Amino acid sequence: MRIATWNVNSIRQRAEHVRDWLGRVQPDVLLLQELKCEEAAFPAAGFTELGYSAAVVGQKAYNGVAALARVPVEVVHRKLPGLPEDDAQARYIELRAGALTIIGIYLPNGNSGGEAGYAYKLAWMEALAARVQALLDDDADVVLTGDFNVAPEDVDYAKGALSADDALVRPETRARYRRLLWLGMTDALRALVPEGPVYTFWDYQSAAWQRNSGLRIDHFLLSPRVAERLAGCRPDKDERGKMQPSDHVPVVLDLAG
DNA sequence: ATGACTGAGCATCTCAGA
């Protein structure tokens, strides 16, 4: 089973990149983030042609997540349980694929909107931990993936790429990420590559790609039985070197069975 | 110390991204 995640920074700008990539890499499920469009504007036909169904949680201009799947999936949630009823940000999709629960997230960045913006990020992380706890209490097999907007350790961002008080690395942010690990989730990439930088994002500015000034902020967290099936996890760096790329690259997870 | 790249939208500037 192959599952992938990709923050595409506008699906309408990146539809051809995604189509080419699906044809080559052939994931069973691809979680997308930062669609930057409503569901009606999502270019679904280009993916169904390739054998992928599309489940879209869209929003005008900002955010937006989706799942493309060539295996049967059922959408379980389109909003993160535990957030206020009037929360309209499209950042969460939860699927069932056979016995697996697959969650795709676009976690708030937290650097805009002042203290309220950062508080929203923390509240979102609290609700996410509660959701993961509930699933584990039900003995579910969980793959939690997407753009977490968290660089968990100092090795996960290039020197100078972020300031120490950035919302992606603030201690309160990292503590809430660690809480997911304490619940029993395994960081798939770090389980396979325990040391050294492995980036998934390079800013458009300041020649960040050319200088390899990147971040590791797109993750796969696996519940215990799923972690036992871990066979591979890698970012596809080649995508960042293409014409008009997203600033994030896809990350691919392979599970045995 | 400075500058600065991409995308969307009631758009030739502002907001957000990270």
Image: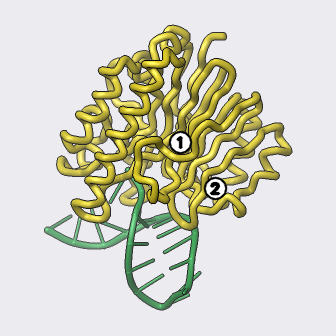
Chain colours: A yellow, B green
Which residue appears at 52% of the width and 46% of the height? A79
The image quadrant that residue A100 belongs to is top right
Pick the residue in front: A78 or B12: A78
Sooner in the amino-acid sequence: mark 2 or mark 1: 2
The residue labelled by disc 1 is A249
Query: What distance separates the C-alpha of mark 2 from that of mark 1?
Result: 13 Å
- Count the labels in the image: 2
* Residue beneath the point at 37% across and 47% down: A211
Of the 4 image quadrants, the one containing the N terminus of chain A is top right
Q: What amino acid type is highlighted by mark number 1?
A: Val
User: Does A135 sit above or below residue A211?
Assistant: above
The amino acid sitting under disc 2 is: Ile
Q: Residue furthest right?
A: A49
Picture quarter containing residue A214?
top left
Question: Which residue appears at 83% of the width and 37% of the height?
Answer: A51
In front here: B12 or A121? Answer: A121
The C terminus of chain A lies in which quarter of the figure?
A: top right
Q: What secondary structure is marked by label 2?
A: helix
| Contact check, label 2 and label 1, Cβ < 8 Å | no
Residue A81's disc is: none
Residue matched to label 2: A11
Location of residue A99 by image quarter? top right
Is residue A165 or residue A107 the one in the foreground?
Answer: A107
Of the pair A257 and A59, the residue shown nearer to us = A59
Q: Is residue B8 left or right of residue A176?
A: right
Residue at point 49% right, 18% down?
A: A138
Residue A121 in picture, x, y percent from top left? 32, 49
Residue A116 position (above or below residue A106):
below
